[in-house]
Amino acid sequence: MADNDVKEEIRRRLDVVEVVSQYVPLQRAGRRFSARCPFHQEKTPSFFVDPERGFWKCFGCGASGDIFSFVMQIEGLTFPEAAEKLAQRAGVQWRVSAGAERAGQERRAVLQANAAAASWFRHKLFEPEGSHALEYLRGRGLTDQIIKDFMLGYAPDGWDHLATYMMGRGASERLLTAAGLVRPRNTGGGCYDFFRHRVMFPVIEVTGRVIAFGGRALDPEEKAKYINSPDTPVFRKGTTVYGLNLAREHIAHAKQVIVVEGYMDVIALAQAGIRNVVACLGT
C-alpha cells in the first residue's frame, strides 16, 4: 500500500475528535467542537475541530491541519514519528525511512528504559533501604494510595545501583545515557547513576508513558534539592508539565487548570481532592 493510501486509511479509521480530545478538552459547538487553542494563549475558545472534514483550525493563531499535523505539533514529533504512532493506533502498517526508523527505535528504547527504571524505583521505595524516603513521604501526609497513583519511588544511595540493575538486564550504557539515567565517568570509563538517594517523581505523558524523572534530595547537605532528567529523545523540559496524565480529565471537567510550582504541590492538592493541577518543571 502506498504512503498516501496508508495516510487515507489512518484518517478513515481514526476519529479526529477522539485523537485531539486526548490532549485538549473539547466542547461541542454545533456540528463542530471547540476549545482554547493548545498552541497559543487565549481567554476565549478559537480552536475548532470539524469531525466531518477531519480537520482542525485555530482562528486566533491561524494554525490548522489534520490529525497528523496536530500530533506532530502537540508532541513535537517529526511526520514519520507521528504517522507511525497514529498507524499503530489505527492498526495499520506504516513504512518509514531508515533514518526515521532509527530515531523511532531509539525513542522506543528510551521509553522502555524509563518504564523499567520507574518500576525499579517504586520497588526500592518499599524495601528497607527506601525506608527513609517512605518516611519522608508519609511525613508529608501522603497515603500509600496517592504514592501509588503518582508512581513515586526511591533512587538508592550509591554510585551505580540502577546502572548495574539495568545493564544486568541487557540495557547498554549508551541507551541509559541517552535516557538521562546515567552519566559517563570523567576518568576510567563506565558510568554512574544520575539520580542517587532521592525520592523519585516519574514525569508521565498523557498516554501514560514515563518520559522523564524528577528527584528530591534526601541528604540535607545536597546542594541541588531537586533535579530533573536532561532533555532526551522523548523529553523536553520546556514543553512539559508534571501531572497532566492524571489531571487532564479533571481539567476538562472543571474547565480550569491550576499551575503550581513543584511535584509535591501537585500531589498534596490531589490528595486533598483538587485534581485539576499541574506543575512547571524547573523555572
Image: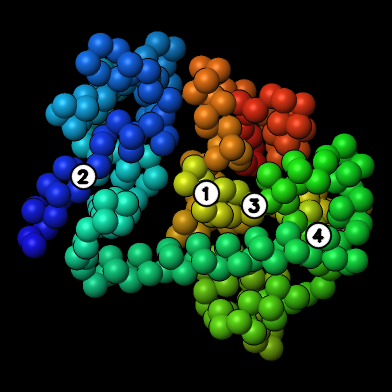
Q: Which amino acid does label 4 sit on?
A: Leu
Closer mark to the observer between disc 4 and disc 3: 4
Q: Which amino acid does label 1 sit on?
A: Gly
* x, y percent for residue 263: 71, 40
Check if mark 1's residue and mark 2's residue have beta carbons within 8 Å.
Answer: no
Check if mark 4's residue and mark 3's residue have beta carbons within 8 Å.
Answer: no
Which residue lies under the disc numbered 3?
202
**Front-most of residues 270 and 59:** 270
Check if mark 3's residue and mark 2's residue have beta carbons within 8 Å.
Answer: no
Q: Distance between the residues labelled 1 and 4?
A: 21 Å
Q: Distance between the residues labelled 3 and 2?
A: 33 Å
The image quadrant of residue 192 is bottom right
Check if mark 1's residue and mark 3's residue have beta carbons within 8 Å.
Answer: no
Closer mark to the observer between disc 4 and disc 2: 2
Q: Earlier in the sequence, mark 3 or mark 2?
A: 2
Residue 259 visible at all: no
* x, y percent for residue 51: 21, 27
* x, y percent for residue 199: 78, 54
* x, y percent for residue 116: 61, 67
119 relative position to 38: left or right: right
Q: Using a 10 Å C-alpha cutoff, classify the residue at mark 2 as few (fewer than 14 neighbours), some (14 to 19) or many (20 or more).
A: some
Q: Using a 10 Å C-alpha cutoff, classify the residue at mark 4 as few (fewer than 14 neighbours), some (14 to 19) or many (20 or more).
A: many
In the picture, the disc for residue 208 is: 1
Q: Distance between the residues labelled 4 and 3?
A: 13 Å
Which residue lies under the disc numbered 2?
13
The image quadrant of residue 46 is top left
Q: Which amino acid does label 3 sit on?
A: Pro
What quarter of the picture does the N terminus occupy? bottom left
Q: Which of marks 1 and 4 is nearer the N terminus?
A: 4
Q: Distance between the residues labelled 1 and 3?
A: 11 Å
